[in-house]
Amino acid sequence: MKHNIKLLNSRQVRRRRCPVRDVMVDEFLFHYSELTRQNKRSQQRLEDSKSNDVATLAAQILQDGQEHGICILEEDGTNLVIWGNTRLKAIQRLASQGLSFHELGKGEIWASYYCGDIHEMRTDQAKENNIHKFAKPARIEDNVKSICDMISCGDMNDNKYGKSYNNLTDVEQRVVAVSKMADCHMPSTTAVWNRVKKSSKLSQSKKRTWEKHEMAAYFGNNNNYGINKNLLVDFNESCERILTADNGKRIGLYMITNACNKGATLAQAQYKKNVYKYVDEIVLLVALNPTTSNAMPSIREQLIVAVQQWNKSSKANTVDRMLFVPQTEDEQDNELISGDFALDKVL
């Protein structure tokens, strides 16, 4: 990947070993305001850095300096943070207190560029999720999602058996998956594999299933409302959350994982928006898990039509927008990687 050499030459630089990639890298000095976090390339974590973790790391950095740089990816002229969010927040915390460390300016942070491909990046992000010291270690759901994403995106097709992952036997799939877990320093590989295995048949049928917490994390990372993913932690029971967008609008977010159960959701949304006036906009986040890839377009269209008919029968629109997460093979190869939704229907 090419970078602006003139701009980099104007920055302070140091040479450090990256514990994630296990190579020597050049780390450049940035101000945190030059970096963008919680972007489409960031780690798909359900929980962001805890305030206590940030405070602990800030105190250590103030005393000992920043031991390891964060990692960024330049995309369309923007520096995207792909790991090191706790370090970034610690530097921001110090700057807000008027503090700096080791003769650096307030808010300055060391960062290296990621130069691998997208497949390597997912593995490295999963590894960093499990080895970093101060942020909360990756939960089993985070690690299961990382492995499922790697399977869906073809990262495990390059293996010692010389066959695509879907063409491996169950035993071979387990060997390949557990080896990848070891590369990523994931604990409890048996527990992770047992969760992944439940999705293996679906991956062979070329369709991805989504659990509710995964849908919430995807929306948190990729919505255009400015809604922080931390507000979506544990959003998996009621399938409902009222959130505030950047522009001040109150967004009623509802999940639908089975089109047959849409009636109760629509009724609840109708009361929240048009009766009690709790929200300004209703958004449905949809993953139609029981369907096959071939049936996906027609099942989605049937749901859209049903919601449109509900809106028409109401005195005022109930649902304003429907977001469908990527599920088919093509969507996993394209929208899932880019962080887009498979279908964005405004009503």
Image: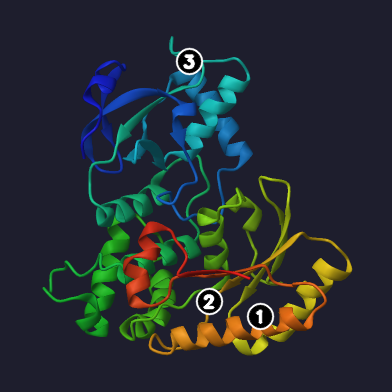
Label 3 vs label 2: CA separation?
47 Å
Q: Residue at x 30, y 43 (%)?
A: 20
Label 1 vs label 2: CA separation?
18 Å
Instruction: Give the mark toward the camera: 3 or 2.
Output: 2
Task: Pick the residue in front: 158 or 303.
Answer: 303
Considering the numbered disc 2 on the image, is that residue within a helix, a strand or a loop?
A: loop
Q: Amino acid at mark 2?
A: Ala
Q: Residue at x 26, y 77 (%)?
A: 173
Position of residue 329 relative to residue 76, above or below, is below
Position of residue 254 relative to residue 6, above or below, is below
Q: What number is the disc on residue 308? A: 1
Disc with the residue nearer the chain's start (1 vs 3): 3
Disc with the residue nearer the chain's start (3 vs 2): 3
Disc with the residue nearer the chain's start (1 vs 2): 2
The residue that mark 2 highlights is 287
The residue that mark 3 highlights is 101
Any part of residue 310 in sight: yes
Quadrant into which the N terminus falls: top left
Q: Amino acid at mark 3?
A: Phe
Answer left or right for 182 relative to 227: left
